[in-house]
Image: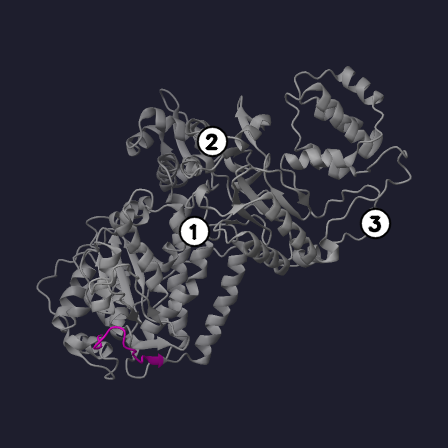
Amino acid sequence: MEAAQDFMARFGARLVDNGYPAIPIWPGTKKPGRFQAGAWCDYPAWTRHCDRPTTLIEVETWATWPDAAIGLACGTLVGIDIDVLDPDIAHRLERLARDMLGDTPLLRIGKAPKRLLVYRADVPFSGPKRAPLEILAQGRQFVAFAIHPDTGQSYVWPEDSPLTVALDDLPVVTEESVRQWLDAAIALLPDDLRPATLVSPSVSMPSTSPQRGTLAAVRSALAHIPNADLEYDSWVRIGMAMKGAIGEDGASLFAAWSAMSAKDVPAATAKAWASFRPTTIGAGTLYHHAMERGWQPNLTLVLDGSTSQDEVHPAAGLLAKLAAIPAEPTAPVQPFDLTIPDGVLGDMVTYMLATARRPQPELSLGASLCAIGALMGRKYRTESNLRSNLYVIALADSGSGKNHSREIINETFFQANLAQYLGGNKIASGAGLLTALHRQPAMLLQIDEFGMFLEGIADRKRSPRHLTEILDNMTELYTSAGGVFLGAEYANRDGKNERRDINQPCLCVYGTTAPTRFWNALQSANVVDGSLARFIVIASGNQYPDENNDTGIRSAPPALIKSLKLIAAGAGRMAAGNLSGLTADPTTAVDPMTVPMDPQAKAIFRDLSRDITVRLREALGTPFTPILARIAENATRVALIRAVSFDPVRPVIRADDAEWAIQFVSTCADRTMVEIGRRVADNDIERNHKRLLEIVRGAGATGLTKSELIRRSQFLDRRQRDEVIAVLVEAGIIEPIMTATVTKPTISFRTTGREAW
């Protein structure tokens, strides 16, 4: 199960900025809650947020509550809840909603394939429920950011989310339009999923009782009906409904529920129960009140007590099918012994290491892959039309030698007369990137201080559009290498603003940065939207290796220069020199060499596909699915580069190419996901928690004394540090250790092994 997260602290302010009526959700549940006297309890007055915007002051208060999740109150906001476990039916109902109500950008998944679509109402209205379909409208709420109590994973917004789409930008619906959709949707449901009216009461109940319920359903519904400050008439009504639903079996249940109120007098409760004589009230009333407060009965729950408990549940077949799906653990991070491959790739890495003051094998490999990938652009492709365009980020501390690989590539390309493949050291705008690629469709961009660069292009709230367009264009170019990238259309087409199309662009990006700067620049949105998934993130295995004192003036080996020229010429099939990689017009079609894959390599990639599918299903609802989904694609690109590196003239992707590429890319992806969980934060509060936890984790099993922890966390003042330590200890993530000394005991801290995020 995924550990609880402070969703309100991370996302609350951003939701308010986008106009959403955020409310606090009791961790581990789907109902609104509040944190009082050191414990979570019900929040009876939450419905007031259906009628007015949430204030920033409220969010800042809720953000201090431990593990506070986030719900959105409905009124202006409307949710179309499709509570169906059949994937095909759920998808058809979603498609129907988009066709009839508008193509909303907001889709939320809790327990797949169930789904919820979000719309906006100009005039609030009450929403009907016809299980398994429901209109969440005035007076209702739904969970937006939380840990799902059934799956143990975060709710996921697979497309856009309320963090990126303002409330005012949602499609507008009316009460009439949603009821029309509901009627049409009901007609699409098979008979066993259509809502059924509760049948007449069983003979065991008095004839005056209108609806018989079941003990399990009543207990489940009652858990969603608060009784902190309930007025007397409502208290009586709930008691009458319980007795009408399950008779005297509800006496102890009603007494326990009544005892939740400070006004409860046990003797008076028992006397009132004995006096109840329900004639027109029963389970339906109780269920109605519970559903108004967020209760969504499980499909396995029998609501109608008049139905024989021995009957087969109408969804039994579907439930059995779901239960039969095996649940395997997510693959752990595997160790990876870096081996330098043969061919041009190995020659370039070896040259970099031999000339480096501080040799960095991992960084040299990443830089070489990108360099050769750029030279291969528009000249080689796989049988599935994948190309050699790679995005690689190399992480190493300052002074560790991370710049050397870039310097070697620059010098070698100039020596080989291939400098036209080198893009500038800086990218000023998204339009500037496209202009450079239009001039040179196959290009290598080498960016130092990539973390600083990423801060500018990834922050959509504060950065200007011309910067954020850089990341947008890079994301689109990554998937456009095998086709035509269509340029932007301009209103004023005066010769300078003509649309610029690029046929088969090959952009390779190699960025270097310090680890802390890189992870601090990322936000969870960059993980979820898939922009990070396109990058292979490589970390140095040894931040400060021994110095090589024999380095000096260098010149690339002639054999390496010759091999790079051969690859740039497509093994002699295309022009070399300054014209290599270019055509008379970047929109002109080119005909790359197709690199085949032998049967063994194909079998290895088929096995990878099955493994990734299993991991994707396990990771559903987490931010890691985009990264997992790109492993096979990135591994195929790397295998293509390795195969061409070994034999540019008659390349074939063989089993050893496939195995090496898969191990390399998978290891990088697994380590990236671990680092995301430990380091990526959306605000300073979350960032401080994670930074301090990393300091304690780095101390290992022996722990860290409080004085040493203070010394290493000078980025926090005393109050902030004490608050962070208190939260981590209370959550059971770190633990204090008392050690006796001659004078007085000392306090140390160590991790407990539980992950906080």
Residue name at image x 50 percent, y 51 percent? 104
Callout in the foreground (1, 3): 1
* 414 in magenta: no
**Nearer the observer, 105 or 226:** 105
Amino acid at circle 3: Asp
Segment tinted magenta in the rendering: 582-594
Residue 439, quarter of the rendered image: bottom left
- State the CA–CA distance, disc 3 to disc 2: 48 Å
Mark 3 lies on a secondary structure that is: loop
Callout in the foreground (2, 1): 2
Q: Is residue 142 left or right of residue 470?
A: right
**Nearer the observer, 44 or 1:** 44
In the rendered image, the vertical position of residue 497 relative to residue 214, given as above or below? below
Q: Find disc 3 in the rendering and name its residue.
A: 310
- Residue 1 in percent (x, y) is at 55, 45
**Nearer the observer, 393 or 226:** 226
Amino acid at circle 2: Thr
Callout in the foreground (3, 2): 2
Q: Find disc 1 in the rendering and name its residue.
A: 528
